[in-house]
Image: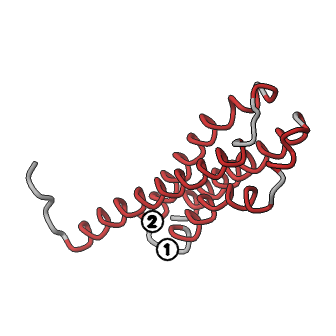
């Protein structure tokens, strides 16, 4: 029963990793003056961190609610990757400067932070459901 959401979550995470790793590699190919910044192993490894972290946090659990959370977070990560990376792919010549590596590091840090925040909120909601505690009044 939980296999379908997990499978879809894995597919979304793989698509996000391909986009996150493919963008700096393509930019380094399309604009060779950026390759010294974008082919850095730390920058490339950092791009995969949010996706690997999402998989590590939510996919090992057997509960259907955890699979649903994994699917939602994976879809949000892919949506963020599309919004952030697609404009760079459409106009690779418009990217430039020595701060492009920092931009990719910042993207990784912000998406990882957003993933951790979303995971904390989802874990709290799941814990409250498990404990059957009522939500505080608004």
Q: Is residue 48 above or below residue 95?
A: below
Q: Is residue 14 above or below residue 24?
A: below
Residue lying at 71% horizontally and 42% vertically, measured from the top left: 100
Which of these two is toward me, 110 or 19?
Answer: 110
Q: Classify 10 Å Cα crowding around label 2: few (below 14), some (14-19), many (20 and above).
A: many
Describe residue 112's horizontal placement relative to residue 26 as left or right.
Answer: left
Q: Give the residue at the far left of this rendering.
A: 137
Q: Is residue 76 above or below residue 89?
A: below
Which image quarter: residue 56? bottom right
Residue 39 image offset from top left, x and y in percent: 84, 53
Q: Which residue does the numbered mark 1 point to in the structure image? A: 62
Q: Is residue 71 above or below residue 23?
A: below
Which of these two is toward me, 57 or 37?
Answer: 37
The reply to whether dot 2 and dot 1 touch (C-beta < 8 Å) is yes
Describe residue 62's horizontal placement relative to residue 103 as left or right.
Answer: left
Q: Give the residue at the far front of this rendering.
A: 98
Residue lying at 42% horizontally and 61% vertically, measured from the top left: 119
The circle on residue 66 is 2
Which of these two is toward me, 76 or 83?
Answer: 83
Residue lying at 49% horizontally and 74% vertically, measured from the top left: 62
Which of these two is toward me, 59 or 22?
Answer: 22
Residue 8 image offset from top left, x and y in percent: 61, 53
Describe residue 9's horizontal placement relative to residue 131 as left or right.
Answer: right
Which image quarter: residue 121? bottom left
């Amino acid at each position: 029963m939980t296999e379908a959401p997990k499978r879809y979550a894995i597919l979304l995470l793989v698509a996000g990793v391909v986009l996150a790793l493919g963008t700096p590699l393509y930019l380094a190919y399309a604009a060779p003056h950026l390759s010294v910044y974008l082919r850095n192993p730390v920058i490339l490894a950092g791009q995969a961190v949010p996706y690997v972290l999402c998989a590590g946090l939510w996919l090992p659990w057997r509960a259907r609610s955890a699979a649903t959370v994994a699917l939602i977070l994976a879809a949000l990560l892919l949506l963020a990757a599309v919004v952030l990376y697609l404009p760079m792919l459409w106009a690779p010549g418009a990217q430039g400067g020595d701060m492009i590596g920092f931009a990719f590091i910042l993207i990784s840090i912000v998406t990882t932070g957003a993933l951790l925040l979303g995971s904390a909120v989802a874990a709290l909601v799941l814990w409250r459901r498990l404990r059957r505690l009522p939500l505080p009044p608004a």
